[in-house]
Amino acid sequence: MFLGRIVGNVWSTVKWPELSGLKLLLVRPYALADLAAPPAPRAPTTELVVCADTLDAGVGDDVVIAYGHAARVAVSQTLGETERPSVPIDAAVVAVVDRIEVKTGD
Amino acid sequence: MFLGRIVGNVWSTVKWPELSGLKLLLVRPYALADLAAPPAPRAPTTELVVCADTLDAGVGDDVVIAYGHAARVAVSQTLGETERPSVPIDAAVVAVVDRIEVKTGD
Amino acid sequence: MFLGRIVGNVWSTVKWPELSGLKLLLVRPYALADLAAPPAPRAPTTELVVCADTLDAGVGDDVVIAYGHAARVAVSQTLGETERPSVPIDAAVVAVVDRIEVKTGD
Amino acid sequence: MFLGRIVGNVWSTVKWPELSGLKLLLVRPYALADLAAPPAPRAPTTELVVCADTLDAGVGDDVVIAYGHAARVAVSQTLGETERPSVPIDAAVVAVVDRIEVKTGD
Amino acid sequence: MFLGRIVGNVWSTVKWPELSGLKLLLVRPYALADLAAPPAPRAPTTELVVCADTLDAGVGDDVVIAYGHAARVAVSQTLGETERPSVPIDAAVVAVVDRIEVKTGD
């Protein structure tokens, strides 16, 4: 999994029917330097990940994102498909972060 | 999943039979800097992803790409194989993007 | 798998129910240079991985992390789900490291 | 999937029995800059991928490579194992490229 | 799969029981430049991969590493679990390399 900040939204009309009603968020992964104090400005070249969300997360939230089967399990359980996760996504918010504690001493 | 711009096409005669009739697109992933305003020129060294498309996307479209099982689920449903996705692809267009909204303030 | 140092913790209230009671750690992957002698100071830009832990590892420990199905197998066995690992995680501590031996001669 | 040029071969005697008779190729992935005109010299630091081939591709060919389950499906079908792909590979040639068309205008 | 040189070992006491007796190796992936002649000194910042080995490979050997399901299949067959690979690893040696041939002309 990775830790990221939600920075935006994506809207789409032409998409796989299984994605209907599923919110798609843009997430910027955190690197260790981003969590150092005092916070340094982040480089603007960071990669972007698109992930599904069913936990009601929004822009500015820090979240934990899981990839692959783990993401489909999480979203499928919301959609009531527990046996064979078939929603065509590969990343989803699995937790909204309350607090992060980092020890960068060594 | 990731957000990308379709930049080209790939044609092939010698290929796995399961790929017959499946359009293969070249997609350039977006980084966060690419979505800042005013848009800066993009570096030409970006990696390229080849993905299957059954949503009728074309060069210049912005799309959401899913990897792995998610991609096979999406394409297999078009091909009528719902039970055991066996098409040998690992990336597919799952949504054509209408609008992107990014907050880069922090 | 990869070798990393545990550098922090993540706390979350809003999360998938399957994550309840599962410790989430922040792990900084090692590069080869980090293991050379004398140890050089590490660059602060290292990527961060969030992983589940059921082996009682803590900040400062060196661990081996596995991704994907391997991580779910490891954690599901603790949770008593041996047949169909459905916990929505994609990375877990599978070993706490006692000793590392590296030959960097060539 | 990704687009790459075959640049070499790998030979092995001690290997998993399931790999017997399976050709292993070294493939250099293309970046977008490599496809621009006039072709610039490529950086020599490119990563290398080892992939299985059952399409009779050779050094100098441009190919599409699929990862993971998709690769095993492709190779297993050659080996006559359609139900449960168990060949221990994670990358395979799924198409030999005839023509690439790239629009790098924006 | 990728091509790498074995550069070290990892020892662990606290680990998943399924890892008992399984050798864990540190492997440094090759980039294309590393295979050019005359061999240039390698950058010391290379990433490190931890992988399981049941082919009796050792420090200094060049090996082919497979990820994910492929790795579990390879190791599970040694452990006598052919049906449902459940060993919690995600990378394994699948071949010890005898000879590499690279054409870097273009």
Image (cartoon, coloured by chain):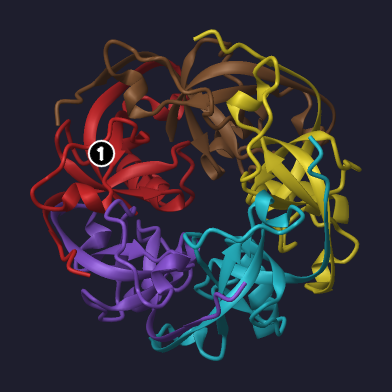
Chain colours: A red, B brown, C purple, D yellow, E cyan
Q: Position of residue D49 (x, y in %)?
A: 68, 50
Q: Position of residue B62 (x, y in %)?
A: 46, 16
The amino acid type, in three-letter code, at marker 1 is Thr
- Residue at image position (15%, 50%) is A97
Residue D20 placement, left or right of A45: right
- Residue at image position (87%, 47%) is D54
Residue C56 vertical placement versus E37 (above, below) = below
Residue D94 can be seen in this image: yes
Q: Position of residue A92 (x, y in %)?
A: 34, 43
Residue B66 placement, left or right of E63: left
- Say how many tags the image has: 1
Secondary structure of the residue carrying tag 1 is loop
Q: Could you classify mark 1 by the number of other residues whose Cα lies within 10 Å: few (under 14), some (14-19), or many (20 or more)?
A: some
Would you identify the image quadrant in which residue E77 lies?
bottom right
Towards the viewer: A47 or E22: A47
Residue E46 placement, left or right of B23: left
- Residue at image position (75%, 31%) is B19
Towards the viewer: B14 or E42: E42
Would you identify the image quadrant in which residue B14 lies?
top right
Residue D97 vertical placement versus C82 (above, below) = above
Which residue corresponds to mark 1?
A54
Towards the viewer: B45 or C83: B45
Towards the viewer: A88 or B77: A88
Chain of the residue where label 1 is placed in the rendered structure: A
Residue B13 vertical placement versus C6 (above, below) = above
Residue A1 vertical placement versus C8 (above, below) = above
- Residue at image position (32%, 51%) is A2
Residue C81 can be seen in this image: no
